């Protein structure tokens, strides 16, 4: 069973892709050089007069300033060049790989040992707090604090929505697994699951915990059980079918 496909995602900080691209270029040209307020006001005026801003809320110059400040503060001491696919495992969270190694070592004699190159990952976006499948690990860096970050590209999204994600705060992990209809018995009250939240304006995955399970007889359509889940990000509750849930890997 495949995971349900997210329909859309919020635009980063209200800026359009073209605006982010321009700010990235200006940031690269200026480096760590400080800009005065007039620079940010002039940039905001240019954004608000562009065709791409038609029908969208006006950009405040303080929002532009905050974007630059945040990016400059997270400027890395070391930034690796674009990684080849064979090198991407060097930037995967150590905890994820450790668990994978432990699972492989604990496998029974005669069973196939896990190939780490086959692992797939998901990461939590700092934009909306939702989880997205990782397509590519682009590069990595170390902040002045010593904290490691990985630059990711998510499945189904372009370069304008690449993100730097912290390795330290468990924002990257081995991909959650969709459930087959016969696997509903694997879920228990209190389990952490990844739930596909569907709303009018968006449909994305959030972490949740199972609060209650209503067992029902399966029919030709498959599992008909109902699961009451509580979302971790806002503590709201919802009753959902199995098809909207993914379980965490056993390792």
Image (spheres, rainbow, N blue to C red):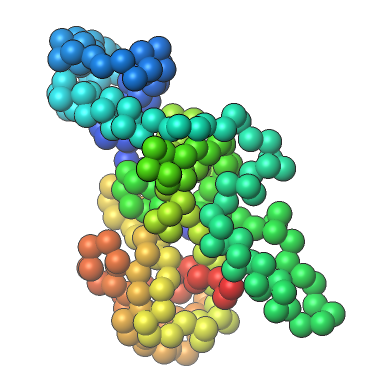
User: Does the rendering let one see residue 157?
Assistant: no
In this picture, is 154 found above or below 159?
below
Locate residue 109 relative to residue 173 in the image: left or right.
right
In this picture, is 197 found above or below 212?
above
Residue at 41% across, 79% down: 191
Pick the residue in front: 127 or 216: 127
The spot of residue 59 in percent (x, y) is 18, 23
Q: Can you say which quadrant of the picture contains the C terminus?
A: bottom right
The spot of residue 9 in percent (x, y) is 36, 43
Classify residue 75 by image quadrant: top left
In this picture, is 46 found above or below 86?
above
The spot of residue 111 in percent (x, y) is 80, 77
Q: Can you say which quadrant of the picture contains the N terminus?
A: bottom right
Residue at 39% across, 21% down: 24
Residue at 72% across, 43% down: 86
The spot of residue 208 in percent (x, y) is 35, 69
**Numbered marks: total:** 0
Question: Of all residues shown, which one is farthest toward the right?
Answer: 110
Locate residue 183 relative to residue 15 in the image: left or right.
right
Pick the residue in front: 149 or 213: 149
In this picture, is 149 found above or below 1?
above
Locate residue 110 relative to residue 165 in the image: left or right.
right
Pick the residue in front: 179 or 134: 134
Residue at 38% across, 85% down: 189
């Amino acid at each position: 069973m495949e995971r349900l496909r997210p329909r859309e995602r919020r635009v980063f900080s209200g800026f359009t892709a073209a605006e982010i691209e321009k700010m990235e270029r200006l940031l690269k040209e200026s480096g760590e050089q400080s800009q005065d307020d007039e620079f940010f006001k002039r940039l905001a005026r240019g954004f608000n007069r562009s065709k791409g801003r038609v029908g969208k809320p006006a950009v405040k110059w303080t929002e532009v300033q905050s974007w630059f400040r945040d990016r400059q503060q997270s400027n890395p001491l070391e930034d690796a060049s674009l990684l080849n696919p064979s090198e991407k495992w060097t930037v995967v969270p150590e905890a994820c790989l450790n668990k994978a190694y432990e699972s492989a070592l604990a496998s029974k004699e005669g069973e196939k040992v896990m190939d780490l190159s086959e692992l797939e990952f998901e990461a939590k976006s700092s934009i909306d707090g939702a989880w997205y499948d990782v397509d590519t690990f682009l590069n990595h860096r170390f902040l002045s604090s010593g904290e490691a970050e990985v630059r990711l590209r998510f499945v189904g999204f372009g370069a304008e929505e690449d993100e730097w994600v912290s390795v330290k705060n468990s924002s990257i992990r081995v991909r959650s697994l969709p459930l087959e209809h016969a696997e509903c018995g694997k879920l228990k009250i209190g389990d952490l699951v990844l739930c596909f939240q569907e709303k009018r304006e968006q449909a994305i995955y959030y972490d949740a915990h199972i609060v209650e399970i209503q067992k029902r007889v399966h029919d030709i359509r498959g599992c008909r059980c109902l699961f009451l889940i509580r979302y971790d990000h806002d503590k709201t509750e919802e009753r959902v079918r199995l098809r909207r849930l993914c379980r965490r890997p056993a390792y």
